[in-house]
């Protein structure tokens, strides 16, 4: 009987650790606001970060321009990435400890081939 109770405890602890670990793995990775298309404006928020960007397209290329802001003094930074078919482009990190940037805002201007590009806001 004790073996069954111990076995159940181990399974419960293992499941809890798996759930906790899965949560840690996904924290900070961000989720796509959407695979953005041409001529759109997106406002995105995650815990500790905020961003806004607009898109435009011309001659098979998409421009994504906007800003990212750190919104929490938690030691993490906010960042945006766009995953073009030719490679990923990253914004500068907006960090709470930026003495040269007291507003905690960084601007970005990405350009690349495509008309349907996943864009992510996340904290690191």
Image (tube, grey):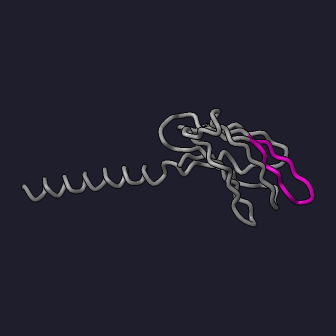
Q: Residue 111 appears at what percent x and percent y?
A: 81, 56
- Please state if 35 lies on the left or on the right of 11 as rendered: right
- Please state if 77 lies on the left or on the right of 74 as rendered: right
Q: Residue furthest front?
A: 100
Q: Residue 115 appears at what percent x and percent y?
A: 82, 55
Residue at 59% across, 44% down: 78
- The verdict on residue 65 being magenta is yes
Q: State which region is magenta.
A: 53-66
- Please state if 46 lies on the left or on the right of 51 as rendered: left
How many numbered tags mark residues here?
0
Indicate whether 94 appears above or below 22.
above
Residue at 74% across, 55% down: 117
Residue at 75% across, 42% down: 66
Indicate whether 90 appears above or below 87.
above
Q: Quadrant of residue 18?
A: bottom left
Residue at 85% across, 44% down: 39
- The verdict on residue 1 being magenta is no
Q: Main secondary structure of the magenta part?
A: strand
Q: Residue furthest right?
A: 59
Q: Residue 122 appears at what percent x and percent y?
A: 58, 47
Q: Residue furthest bottom?
A: 86
In the picture, which quadrant includes the N terminus? bottom left
- Please state if 30 lies on the left or on the right of 8 as rendered: right
Q: Residue 103 appears at what percent x and percent y?
A: 65, 33
- Closest to the observer: 9 or 65? 65
């Amino acid at each position: 009987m004790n073996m069954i109770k111990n076995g159940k405890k181990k399974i419960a602890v293992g499941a809890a650790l798996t759930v906790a670990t899965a949560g840690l793995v996904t924290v900070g990775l961000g989720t796509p606001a959407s695979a953005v298309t041409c001529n759109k404006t997106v406002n995105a928020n995650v815990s500790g970060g905020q961003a806004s960007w607009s898109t435009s397209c011309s001659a098979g290329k998409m421009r994504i321009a906007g800003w990212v802001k750190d919104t929490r003094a938690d030691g993490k930074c906010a960042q945006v990435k766009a995953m073009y078919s030719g490679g990923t482009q990253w914004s500068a990190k907006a960090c709470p400890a930026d003495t040269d940037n007291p507003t905690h805002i960084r601007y970005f201007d990405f350009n690349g081939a495509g008309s349907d590009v996943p864009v992510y806001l996340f904290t690191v």
